[in-house]
Image (tube, rainbow, N blue to C red):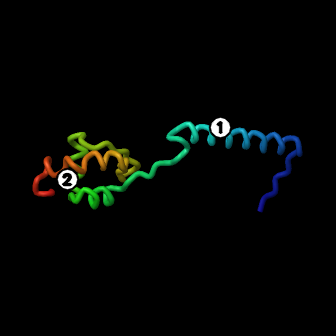
Amino acid sequence: MEIVSIEKKTFEMMVASFNALAEKVAALRRRSDGGRMERWLTGEEVCGQLRISPRTLQTLRDRRLIGYSQINRRFYYKPEEVKRLIPLVGTLYPGGK
């Protein structure tokens, strides 16, 4: 294990900087969406709620009928996007697929 020694004044400045950063992050979080972090849904959850296949979900993405975010190879969907599509899925895909 390596031990690093710094002056007390330097340490106090680092702690103050960290606290200032933490406060800025908290303020930004409060400002966006009232401070609550929204839970995004996975593709499996969306398919289950809409009762559609993964391929149909891909078609909805391709046709830009559902908004999404992609992180690496996974897609995530906002709950309000899914709720908006619930009444439309039966008319877009009468067989449920």
Q: Residue type at mark 1? A: Lys
**Left or right side of 84 for 24:** right
Q: At numbered mark 2, what does the secondary structure look like: helix, strand or loop?
A: helix
Kindly identify which residue carries mark 1. 24
* Contact check, label 1 and label 2, Cβ < 8 Å: no
| Quadrant of the image containing the N terminus | bottom right
Judge from the rendering whether residue 38 lies leftward or rightward of residue 15; answer left or right.
Answer: left
The single residue placed furthest to the right in the displayed view is 8
| Residue appearing at x 84%, y 43% in the figure | 12
Residue 5, placed above or below residue 13? below
**Residue at position x 28%, y 45% from top?**
84
Compared with residue 50, is residue 37 higher up or lower down, i.e. above or below?
Answer: above
Amino acid type at mark 2: Thr
| Position in image of residue 74 (x %, y %) | 36, 53
Q: Which mark is residue 75?
A: none
Query: Can you identify the residue that label 2 sits on?
Result: 56
Quadrant showing the C terminus: bottom left
In this view of the protein, which residue sits in the foreground, 47 or 15? 47
Image position, residue 2 (x, y; %): 78, 58
